[in-house]
C-alpha cells in the first residue's frame, strides 16, 4: 500500500519559475528521500533527509521535513525543461531498509 | 557500466506463461530490492535480499511470485502462470550497506516493463 501522498498530483510551470511539491506520510520514519523518474525510465535519487534534520539543500533542490506533521516538501528553484519528470518521496523505518513510496507528482516545465 | 542493469527491458507474455526477470546490482552492493510499479503509481515493495538471504518477502502479491539471489549478486524474479494484473514495471534496486549501515540510498535499474496479454 502507498505510504504517502504527493501534492499536487500534477504541476505545470514556466521555465525559470520555482516548483514546490509536498509529501505526507503515515508512520514514524528513519529517512525520507526524493526520487525523480523520467517517462519510461528508472528512478534517480535526488536527496535524502534524516528524521532528525529539518532542512537540506543540494544545488537547486531544497527539502524540508516536519516530523510532527509527517510531511516534507521539495522545492526546485529556477526550473529547467530538463526537470520535467515525475517526483516521488519515499520513506524507510528504523531497522528496515525497504522504501515506501508516495503516489508522485508529475511536473511539466513549459519552455 | 557501474549502474544497476535489468533484463529484458520489455517482456510480452501470454496469460499463463512463466517469466523470469533478471537484475544485476552494482558490484559489491549487499542489499537488493525488487519493486513493482503499476502505471501512474509509485513503486511498491516486493522483496529484499541481504547478500543471498531473502530477509523480507512480505510484498510478494501471491505464491506465483518467487525471487532468488543464490550467490549474493545477480537476482531473478520469477512469475509463474502470469495474469493480466501482473502487467507493470518491475524495478530492481541495490544499496551498499546492510541494515544498520549509514548509507541508505538505493540505486535503481531501468526496470523491466511486463505486459501480460
Image (cartoon, coloured by chain):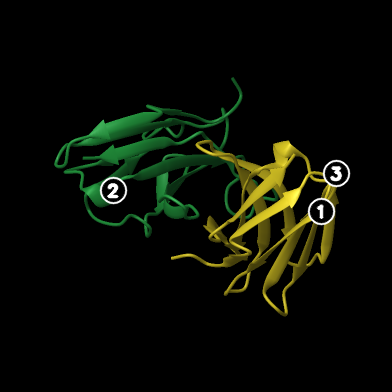
Query: How far apart, in angstroms, are the residues tagged by discs 3 and 2?
Result: 39 Å
Q: Does label 1 or label 3 sit earlier along the sequence?
A: 1
Outermost residue, left side: B16
Q: Which residue is mark 1?
A: A18
Q: Quadrant of residue B78?
A: top left
Q: Residues within 10 Å of mark 1 (few under 14, many from 20)?
A: some
Q: Residue A59's mark?
A: 3
**Residue A69 percent coordinates (x, y):** 70, 79
**Identity of the residue drawn at 85% across and 52% down:** A57
**Identity of the residue drawn at 27% across and 32% down:** B12
Label 3 close to label 2 by CB (< 8 Å): no
Q: Do callouts 1 and 2 point to residues on the same chain?
A: no
**Residue A23 percent coordinates (x, y):** 65, 65
**Identity of the residue drawn at 42% across and 49% down:** B39
Label 1 close to label 2 by CB (< 8 Å): no
From what the image shows, is residue A99 above or below residue A81? below
**Of circles 1 and 2, which is in front?**
1
The chain coloured green in the image: B
The chain coloured yellow in the image: A
**Residue B41 percent coordinates (x, y):** 47, 55
Q: Which residue is mark 2?
A: B86
Outermost residue, top side: B1
Amino acid at each position: 500500500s502507498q505510504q504517502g501522498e504527493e501534492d499536487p498530483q500534477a504541476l505545470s510551470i514556466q521555465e525559470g519559475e520555482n516548483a514546490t511539491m509536498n509529501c505526507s506520510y503515515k508512520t514514524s520514519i528513519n529517512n525520507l528521500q526524493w526520487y525523480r523518474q523520467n517517462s519510461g525510465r528508472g528512478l534517480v535519487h535526488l536527496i535524502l533527509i534524516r528524521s532528525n534534520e529539518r532542512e537540506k539543500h543540494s544545488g537547486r533542490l531544497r527539502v524540508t521535513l516536519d516530523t510532527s506533521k509527517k510531511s516534507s516538501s521539495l522545492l526546485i528553484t529556477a526550473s529547467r525543461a530538463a526537470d520535467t519528470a515525475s517526483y516521488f518521496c519515499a520513506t524507510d523505518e528504523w531497522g528496515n531498509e525497504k522504501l515506501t513510496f508516495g503516489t508522485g507528482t508529475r511536473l511539466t516545465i513549459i519552455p | 557500466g557501474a549502474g544497476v542493469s535489468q533484463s529484458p527491458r520489455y517482456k510480452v507474455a501470454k496469460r499463463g506463461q512463466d517469466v523470469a526477470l533478471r537484475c544485476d546490482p552494482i558490484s559489491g552492493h549487499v542489499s537488493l530490492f525488487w519493486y513493482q510499479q503499476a502505471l501512474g503509481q509509485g513503486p511498491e515493495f516486493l522483496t529484499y535480499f541481504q547478500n543471498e538471504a531473502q530477509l523480507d518477502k512480505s510484498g510478494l502479491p501471491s505464491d506465483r511470485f518467487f525471487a532468488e539471489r543464490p550467490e549474493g549478486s545477480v537476482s531473478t524474479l520469477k512469475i509463474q502462470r502470469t495474469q493480466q494484473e501482473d502487467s507493470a514495471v518491475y524495478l530492481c534496486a541495490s544499496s551498499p550497506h546492510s541494515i544498520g549501515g549509514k548509507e541508505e540510498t538505493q540505486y535503481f535499474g531501468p526496470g523491466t516493463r511486463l505486459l501480460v496479454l
